[in-house]
Image (spheres, helix red, strand yellow):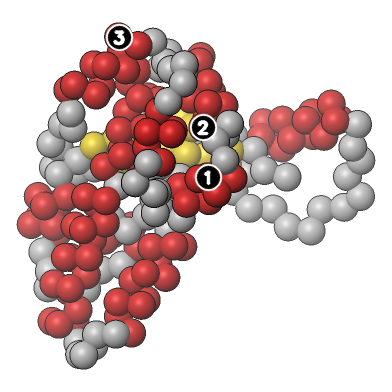
Amino acid sequence: MEDTYYSESSELDRDKLRQRIRDYVADQGWRISGEHREESGVLPIVLDGDAERYWQEAGTAVARAGMRALLFHHTTGYSLPDAVRLADLVASAPELSTVALAPAIKAHSLARWDEQGFFRLLNRLMFEAARPAERYRTLQHFYRCSERLIGRFYAGRPGPLDPLRILSGRPPVPLGRALGCLLRGPRRQPVPAAVARRGL
């Protein structure tokens, strides 16, 4: 069982989340036979940012990985697929010194940043175009898509027509506000602007 939601705060009320899960289980008429493990965490999602400036300020004297290298899914906050991609990059590198790896990882990070522009647009639609009480409609709209599309999305590798499929149909946010996000384009902030994706 998982309870995951998006928030503008990184605070995590574990007791409240546990109760929400218990309430959901009860509403379904299920019975919990036992608990094996519990995980909780807060993951970042990115609304915007200037990755080039981030890397200029961070420098490339030391090879970075994971969140410090901006290598995570900008909508889900998950980092495993990007960790696997980075492991492949490192494994195929002709030299494993930090001097050799640092610029290669920076180039890889910037390429992944560019590839995830659509994810950041979706985040802005959810947090800037949607009214807070109706943000869930964005997720409802998304989960009506095919399982294969959803799989590609979570892997961080959407197909060329997936953005059109995700954005098609009746918009889950007010059209005027959505157009504002689309027409405004990204804002260039020195460090990625993040909000929290929380779960238990």
Q: Label 3's element? A: helix
- For residue 167, say whether it is visible: yes
* Residue 119 image position (x, y, % from top left): 35, 40
**Residue 195, percent from left and from top:** 37, 35
Which residue carries the number 1 mark? 150
Residue drawn 13% across and 81% down? 99
Estimate the spatial distance between the alpha carbons at disc 1 and disc 2, rounded to whole Å.
Answer: 8 Å
The secondary element bearing badge 2 is classed as: helix
Q: Please tell me which residue is depicted at 50% across the width and 45% down the height of the picture.
A: 149
Left or right: where 92 falls relative to 184: right
Task: Name the residue beneath numbered marker 3.
Answer: 176
Q: Is residue 95 above or below residue 196?
A: below
Answer whether labels 1 and 2 touch (C-beta < 8 Å). Answer: yes
Q: Nearer the viewer, residue 13 or 189?
A: 189
**Residue 24: percent from the left, percent from the top?**
78, 30
> Disc 2 marks which residue?
142
Secondary structure under badge 1? Answer: helix
Kind of residue at disc 1: Ile
Q: Is residue 192 left or right of residue 84?
A: left
Q: Which mark is residue 160?
A: none
Nearer the N terminus, badge 1 or badge 3?
Answer: 1
